[in-house]
C-alpha cells in the first residue's frame, strides 16, 4: 500500500459500484471489502481513518442487520475511524439510527462523487485534527493542576494561586461546596511542594465519631483505653515530613480544635495515654464547605485556630458559576469512563450537551462525574442522549438590566464555544460569527485570555 496516500476503506458488495468508487476517490489509497469478515481484516491491518459502509451486506443484503452489526464492531475495534454510512435515497430511519450508534455521517445512494468526496475529505481532516490533539496530550507532560480542567477566569486564578503557594509550606484553607474538587487541589499542593516524595495523608473530620477522632489524629499508647492493644501512631505522626489534609475541618469538635491549635503553635504531639512529646514536621491543608466566619460568630469555631489554618485561603467557585466548565469536564469524564468500561468511543450528542449546560449541578463536579459514569453504562450504542443523563433542568428567572444581560450572554457564549472547540480560537471565532481580533478583545474584556 502507498503509505503517502490516506487509506480509505470501501465496504461494498456491488462490484460495479465498488469499481466506480475506487475510480472516483483515487486520491486516497482505496481498500475494498465485500463482506464483514474482509472489512474487519482490512481494518485490523491498515487502520483506515475513513470508512464508507453499505448497510446491505451479505448474508442479508436486503436488510440492514449485517450492516449495523458491522458498524458496531468497527466502532469497538477502531473507535477513532470515521464511518460514513451509505443508505437508500429515502432511508432516513436507518441513517438516523447509524448516527445514534456512532457513525460519523451518512450519504444517500446513488451518490454524487463530488458531494460524497467532500464528506470523505472532511472526515479525513477531522480525523487528522483529533489525532494531532491526542498526540499532543500524550507528549506534553502535565503539571499536577493540569488535571483540574477549567476555562473559568475565577477557577484559573485559584489554580495559579495554588501553584504559587505550594512550594511555600504555608497552611492553606480550601473553601467551597461539596464536590468542587478541594481534595484534588490539596493533592496538587502536595505534589508541587518539596514534600512530594513523602506521604499525603487525608482524614475526613466529619466521617469519624468524636470519641475516635482524637486517637485517629494523635495516636495512642498501648493500654491507653479499652481495646488499645498496641502503640498506634495517629494521622499527624504518619504525615511527618509530608502533608496532612484535614477535610471538613468545620466539623472538628471544640475540644479537638484546642488540641489542634496547640499542635500548630508548638509542632509537637502527645499520643493518648503517653507523656512523651513527639516533634512533628507536617504541612497542614484544611478544607470545609461550611461558613467558618459565621461559625466563629456563633462560638462553634475558635477564631485563633482559624487564623492558624487560614494563612492562605482559596475559595473554589461552584460548577454552576463556571460557564463552559461542565461541558469541558463532561467530554473528559466520558472518555475516561468509556475506557474504564471498555465501551470504545462514546460521544455526547448536542442535546446532551445542552442539558449539561442548562442544569444547575448542586453536587458540583462529583455529581457531574457520577451522572456521566451512569450515562456511559446505560447508553445505547456509541452516543449519549439527553435522556441517558436523567437530568431535570431548572430555569433561571434572575432579572438583570439590558447591559448586564448582553455582557453575560456574550461571556457565556464565548466560554461555551471555547469548551466545545477545545480552545481552538479560529474555530471559536468562526462559530461565534466574529473575527479573531474581535474575539481577542472580548477575551481580554471578560478576563478569559489564558
Image (cartoon, helix red, strand yellow):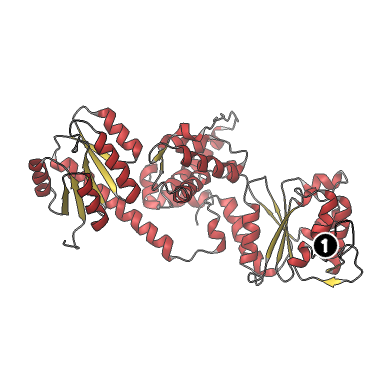
Provide the secondary structure element on which disc 1 rests. helix
Looking at the picture, how far across and down is residue 164, in whole percent?
A: 63, 65
The reply to whether residue 205 is in sight is yes
- Compared across the picture, whether 88 is left or right of 219 comes to left
Is residue 170 shown above or below 441? below
Which quadrant of the figure contains the N terminus? bottom left
Residue at the (38%, 41%) spot, across then down: 382
- Compared across the picture, whether 214 is left or right of 186 comes to right
Looking at the picture, how far across and down is residue 284, in whole percent?
A: 74, 62
Residue 7 placement: quadrant: bottom left
- Compared across the picture, whether 326 is left or right of 363 comes to left
Residue at the (32%, 42%) spot, across then down: 72
- Compared across the picture, whether 250 is left or right of 120 comes to right
Residue at the (39%, 42%) spot, across then down: 432
Residue 99 placement: quadrant: top left
Looking at the picture, how far across and down is residue 201, in whole percent?
A: 70, 62
Q: Out of 138 and 67, give the one closest to the viewer.
A: 67
* Residue carrying label 1: 218
Total number of numbered labels?
1
Q: Out of 389 and 145, give the one closest to the viewer.
A: 389
Is residue 153 shown above or below 90? below
Residue at the (82%, 45%) spot, across then down: 295
Within 10 angstroms of label 1, few (less than 14), some, or many (20 or more) residues? Answer: many
Looking at the picture, how far across and down is residue 154, in whole percent?
A: 60, 51
The reply to whether residue 80 is in sight is no
Q: Out of 274 and 361, give the one closest to the viewer.
A: 274
Amino acid at each position: 500500500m502507498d503509505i503517502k496516500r490516506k487509506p480509505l476503506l470501501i465496504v461494498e458488495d456491488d462490484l460495479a459500484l465498488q469499481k466506480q468508487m475506487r475510480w472516483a476517490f483515487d486520491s486516497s489509497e482505496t481498500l475494498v471489502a465485500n463482506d464483514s469478515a474482509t472489512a474487519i481484516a482490512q481494518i485490523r491491518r491498515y487502520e483506515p481513518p475513513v470508512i464508507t459502509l453499505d448497510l446491505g451486506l451479505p448474508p442479508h443484503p436486503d436488510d440492514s442487520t449485517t450492516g449495523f452489526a458491522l458498524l458496531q464492531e468497527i466502532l469497538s475495534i477502531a473507535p477513532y475511524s470515521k464511518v460514513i454510512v451509505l443508505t437508500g435515497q429515502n432511508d432516513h430511519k436507518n441513517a438516523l439510527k447509524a448516527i445514534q450508534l456512532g457513525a460519523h455521517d451518512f450519504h444517500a445512494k446513488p451518490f454524487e462523487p463530488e458531494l460524497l468526496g467532500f464528506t470523505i475529505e472532511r472526515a479525513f481532516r477531522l480525523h487528522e485534527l483529533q489525532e494531532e490533539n491526542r498526540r499532543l496530550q500524550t507528549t506534553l507532560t502535565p503539571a499536577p493542576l493540569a488535571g483540574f480542567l477549567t476555562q473559568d477566569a475565577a477557577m484559573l486564578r485559584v489554580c495559579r494561586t495554588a501553584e504559587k503557594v505550594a512550594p511555600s509550606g504555608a497552611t492553606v484553607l480550601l473553601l467551597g461546596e461539596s464536590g468542587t474538587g478541594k481534595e484534588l487541589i490539596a493533592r496538587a499542593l502536595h505534589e508541587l511542594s518539596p514534600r512530594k516524595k513523602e506521604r499525603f495523608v487525608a482524614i475526613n473530620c466529619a466521617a469519624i465519631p468524636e470519641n475516635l477522632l482524637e486517637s485517629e489524629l494523635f495516636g495512642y499508647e498501648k493500654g491507653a483505653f479499652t481495646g488499645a492493644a498496641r502503640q498506634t501512631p495517629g494521622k499527624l505522626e504518619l504525615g511527618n515530613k509530608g502533608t496532612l489534609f484535614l477535610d471538613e475541618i468545620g466539623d472538628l469538635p471544640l475540644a479537638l480544635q484546642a488540641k489542634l491549635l496547640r499542635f500548630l503553635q508548638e509542632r509537637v504531639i502527645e499520643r493518648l495515654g503517653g507523656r512523651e512529646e513527639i516533634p512533628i514536621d507536617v504541612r497542614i491543608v484544611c478544607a470545609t464547605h461550611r461558613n467558618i466566619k459565621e461559625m466563629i460568630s456563633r462560638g462553634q469555631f475558635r477564631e485563633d485556630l482559624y487564623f492558624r489554618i487560614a494563612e492562605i485561603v482559596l475559595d473554589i467557585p461552584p460548577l454552576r458559576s463556571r460557564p463552559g466548565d461542565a461541558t469541558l469536564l463532561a467530554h473528559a469524564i466520558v472518555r475516561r469512563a468509556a475506557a474504564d468500561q471498555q465501551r470504545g468511543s462514546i460521544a455526547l450528542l448536542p442535546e446532551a450537551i445542552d442539558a449539561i449546560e442548562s442544569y444547575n449541578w448542586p453536587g458540583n463536579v462529583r455529581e457531574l462525574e457520577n451522572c456521566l459514569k451512569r450515562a456511559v453504562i446505560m447508553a445505547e450504542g456509541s452516543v449519549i442522549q439527553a435522556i441517558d443523563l436523567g437530568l431535570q433542568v431548572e430555569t433561571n428567572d434572575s432579572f438583570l438590566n439590558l447591559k448586564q444581560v448582553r455582557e453575560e450572554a456574550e461571556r457565556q457564549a464565548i466560554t461555551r464555544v471555547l469548551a466545545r472547540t477545545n480552545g481552538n480560537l479560529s474555530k471559536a471565532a468562526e462559530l461565534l460569527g466574529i473575527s479573531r481580533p474581535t474575539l481577542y478583545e472580548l477575551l481580554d474584556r471578560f478576563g478569559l485570555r489564558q
